[in-house]
Amino acid sequence: MANLTHPELAEIRVNTLPPASLENLQAMRTEMCGATEFSLQPQQTFLRRVLSPDSPTRDLLMVHGTGVGKTCSSIQIAEEYILRPEFQDKKVLIIAGPAVQSNFRTEIFDLTRTKLDEKSNTLSSKQCTGTRYLEMLTRIVSEPKQWMVPEVRLRLKTLADRMISEFYEFVGYNSFGTRINEALNDLPEAEADKWIHDTFDNRLVIVDEAHNLREGGDVEVEKSVSSGMEKLVKTANGLVLVLLTATPMYDSYEEIVYYMNLFGWNDRTLSLTKKLKSADYFNADGKVKPAKESEFRDWCQRYVSFVKGENPFTFPFRLPPPNEAADDRTFSFVGKSRRIADAERIKYLTLVASPVQGEQGKALGEETGDEKDEEKRSAMMMPTVSVLPGGKKFREMFKMVGDQYEYAGTPFLTPEELPNYAAKFVTVIKSIEAGVGVSMVYSNYVERGARLFAMALEEHGYVPASGEPLLVGRKGTKGKYIMLTSEITTAQITSLLSLARDRKNMDGSLVRVILTTPKISEGVNFRFVRQVHILDPWWNMSRIEQVIGRGLRTCSHAMLPFEHQNCTVYLHVCRTTSKRECFDEYTYRTKVEQKALKIGNVRKLMMESAMDCPIQLGAVLPPAWKALEVEQVRSENKEQVVYPLFGMVAPQFMDDPEGDYCKVKPSVADPDYVRPLSSYTDVRDELLTRLSKLFVDKEIWERKQLFAALSMYQQDVVAFALQSAIRTGFKFRDAFGRPSLLESRGDLYALAPVGVSNGTLVERTTQMTERSDVPLPDVDATPKPAVTDAPDLSQMREFPFPVDRFDAAVLDGYAFDHSITNAQKVLYLRSGQTTQFSSRLAVPGTDILVLGHETYDPPEVPPGEPLTAVTKWTDDLLAHFEANKSKIFASMKDGKLTMSRFKMEGETPVREAGKKRDVPIVCGTGENKKDAVLALAKFVDRTGAGVPADVAKTNKETWCIYSELLLRTQMQDPDPKVVWYTPEEMETILSAKPKTKKGK
């Protein structure tokens, strides 16, 4: 359980709010959405520290609302593990859908956020990861102005993606479940367990949209993923599990128990043979059993981080629809004569009614069914969206003309005919035409929902923003629409999203209407959306809020005038002339709201008992802020409206959603606790940014003045940052934009422009006039310092056997190839350090490093002498390979020893001939079985001992490692028996074709 008395946690607090006023509201929205530099939010710093390797916490359920930065919070946790050498043997695993994966990569490093200050010729980059990736990339392209060259930016983006892939592995839910379950089904139990240990022990696993793991889901993928995760946590040791979701109880309050089981099994506080049930903790109404309340609150305080979404200082204001449906239905959809009791009526949702007529009115008036069957539910919901003339199918109503449609009968989507077949379409189109800005329309159905609505739009004067209209010959001037479904490619979706999100589309001039389907219910974000229309409900509020959340995002409306920073949400239902509700309204009443009420009971407990509840007390809206009346202009009819601030949020499904807010057990101070070093370094970037601004404002500071100006940090943290900046030579920019170093004299701190050592006050604070001397080439006689963060290979010598017989060069060479990433290799070699074989990666006469076939650092090889040198390096390598074609060769790939095929002739290994003689295979596979490899190891060992007997009796991985060390060692002999190639050389050899003379 997080101990909030620990200094690194005690210092974290959310700033208290100023007095409630419209002026303060506007000022805070402008400031929070207009920040030019990134700073971590309090909960992000808190979670990085609570889940750090220094902390005992190993499980986290991150219940963070839309737009509060939960992706960045999880990245903060991940980056702390990535920086630790003991966790660098396994990449951080991110389990998420494709769209969310892309968002994750962008949050780690987004090149578009990197800007050039032309005056000072410096780069700034507003990133969740601070300057870490920027600093790595500037070692490759150091001149800031080059970053603005399109070709260079493209290359930098490729490099950034490659760096991210060095540290992170991304996998979809289905792929993850399949990977686990295939191992369980295809391997003997012992081998399956070993595979899980090898792959997941001491690994950080982050699951975004973790509600997709839920147990007992209707979709086969959900069952596969949940069962796979259960097996994983029961088997792996030291697994760190972080689950992200705004809706942990997606469909039912009972789903929270799935997470309780996962965490209990993972940290071994719950027997692996025991499984908790919802009935152990909750009554049927979702309220916790009194005898279990304390236990459940303790669980929340130990594992749950809860941050509310829809921050009123960054989110668009959410307006109710202008015409609320009257609560006048008397009879339930189920049972024509069953009356709706007062206690069963909708209390929190606001609906918009569309009166039906014609064939749709007839279809809905006769509709009956059993809503317990999902297929029947879908069939009953569809007529509330649209019906087709004569009950025909979609394909019977249209004929194809190329890729377009033409009516095969009655043109039933025209303004005159549409009310008879799709009343909601009529209502939505009227709202769009009466409004301004961008509108988003969602349906769970593609053919009878989104596509038919798109055709109706075309009949009303709208055209697609890209491509031909769906209906032949349709033209229009009212606006453009885009339609996002599973039938278009990811590239097309990306292009359409870019168009819709463009700042030029603030008024909807590029895209007026966005049609969406379940394809984009997660991971896709829009801007400037003024109307959201839900044509048909899902069976729970979680999915509906996910969809609405695509259009209401943090700062998504910040470019609009304050009075237009709003979005009206319409939940559409059909109404017949009778007093009986239709199936869509029945679903909202009995499924959506009733489920949400039960979930709300548990959600409130989680909010009150979460580990980080006390640090967020300052963010709780006081009554004066909640009641603050805010004037806005609605999109539809440009209606001026006034609502209290707390009345413009998503429905809370309870009368007192915040209650007492915090009910956590107080932490007990530990007098022997020592603050971990990581909590000094994790705010380095943030502190250096603040220090930079302070020294621009004033040239010289006393230490106590700096402590006062940075009072939001502990003094020892500030002192550490100051000394770190001096020790590492961090370059600040002074008031004139000059690169400067921090110096201290006693309790005084000042910046010294580079080249002005022990400068006077005038030299430090005055921009000196440049003289017009004859320019001479600069000669830098001082050696360049080594890169300080190059990896220390000596700290990576961990082997499953004694290695005293092997010298440091061999062990460091092994670590160089096996334990560090390409980016770290570059840092190591650029630092001037060398190890076994590393000199082979440098192209003679250039500063180019070879990282693989046609992969270099710097990435682009300039034409002329550098390209000639690279070509010669490749030709020389291929010539060497050809000259040694009679010898066995060895290398490594993907962390495993590889060798050419060979056979034993007596005690002598001989390289095999044939077409595959030049293609290496993994140690212990194919022709190179264990006995052959051990014989080869003995053959090359100068002592004749080979692999020790006790090592040979272990697993394949271990004796292959020992064999590889022997093969590397024999390369120190004057005439090695086996030729060793680095993995970079081997990749080049296998990919490049050797040049042969004509006719040979």
Image (cartoon, rainbow, N blue to C red):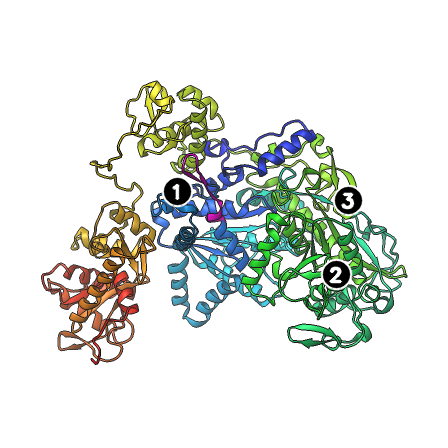
Q: Quadrant of residue 694?
A: top left
573 vs 947, left or right, is: right
Q: Which residues are magenta?
A: 107-124
**Which mark's residue is nearer the viewer, 3 or 2?**
2
The image quadrant where one finds the C terminus is bottom left
Camera-side residue of 342 and 636: 636
Q: At 24% across and 39% down in the image, what residue appears? A: 784
Q: CA separation, marks 1 and 3?
A: 46 Å
Q: Which residue is mark 1?
A: 144
Query: In the rendering, which numbered label is found on residue 638?
Result: 3
Looking at the image, tell me whether mark 3 or mark 2 is earlier in sequence order: 2
The answer to whether any part of residue 334 appears in the image is: yes
Instruction: Quote the CA–CA distance across marks 2 and 1.
Output: 49 Å
In the picture, measured across the screen, residue 168 lies left or right of residue 277, that is left
Nearest to N terminus: mark 1 or mark 3: 1
Residue 589, quarter of picture: bottom right
- Residue 461 is marked as 2
Q: Amino acid at mark 1?
A: Pro
Vertical order, 326 against 468 (above or below): above
